[in-house]
Image: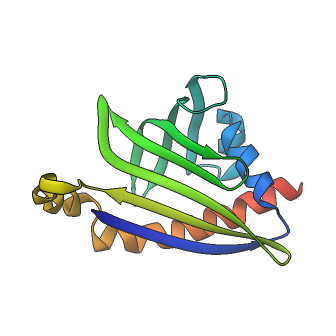
Amino acid sequence: MITLQTIVDVKGVKPKDFYEFILNCTDEDYNRWWPGTHLVWHTVKKFPGNTGNLIYSEQMFGGHLEKGHSVIKKLVPYNEMHFQVIRGIRVPVWYTLKFDDIPGGVRVTHLVFGGFNGIGKIFDPLFRLYLSEAYNAELDPHVIEEFHRLATVLAK
């Protein structure tokens, strides 16, 4: 299993602010968050309690367009959001957002997991082709900037 982690402290917001924004995000909200980079984010199919919601998103990342569906696998209200990537089928790639209270703001932990447990671990090198060191080097500054931008949007 490959794990990529970025942690960013953001002042002036609460975990609930980020959680509710992302859970209820529309294309317009997403675009306002980071114009020209965050292009599309909306719920395609909604379920009671939001676990199982199907999300479609598009964003510019690392010089290319990343787009596709994800499903909300687990929610811990105001603290955690767990998503699984779908590329036609559910693939063994997940991302998690954790929001923790800190004095004057929130600590965001952004995690990306890829690969298998058990015997399937033999395929993990294939995931390393995508979730590479170069990908991680682009991911860290992206995550840091996007959550500082979101705090600015929410302050307006």
10 horizontally vs 136: left or right: right
For the point 19% across and 61% down, the residue is 129
In the image, what residue occupies the spot 76% across and 59% down? 15
Residue at 38% x, 70% y: name it: 136
Q: Measured from the top left, where is residue 75 in percent x and y?
A: 61, 44
Residue 102 screen position, x and y as percent = 78, 75
Q: Is residue 116 visible in the rendered structure shown here? A: yes
Pick the front one: 22 or 32: 22
Quarter location, residue 29: top right
In the figure, 5 relative to 59: above or below? below
The relative height of residue 136 versus residue 87 in the rendered view (above or below) is below
Give the tally of numbered discs.
0
The residue sitting at the right extreme is: 156
Percent x, y for residue 5?
A: 46, 70
State left or right for residue 100 relative to residue 75: right
**Looking at the figure, which quarter contains the N terminus?**
bottom left
What residue is shown at x 22% (from left), y 57% (from top)?
127
Q: Classify residue 101 by image quadrant.
A: bottom right
Left or right: 59 with respect to 80? left
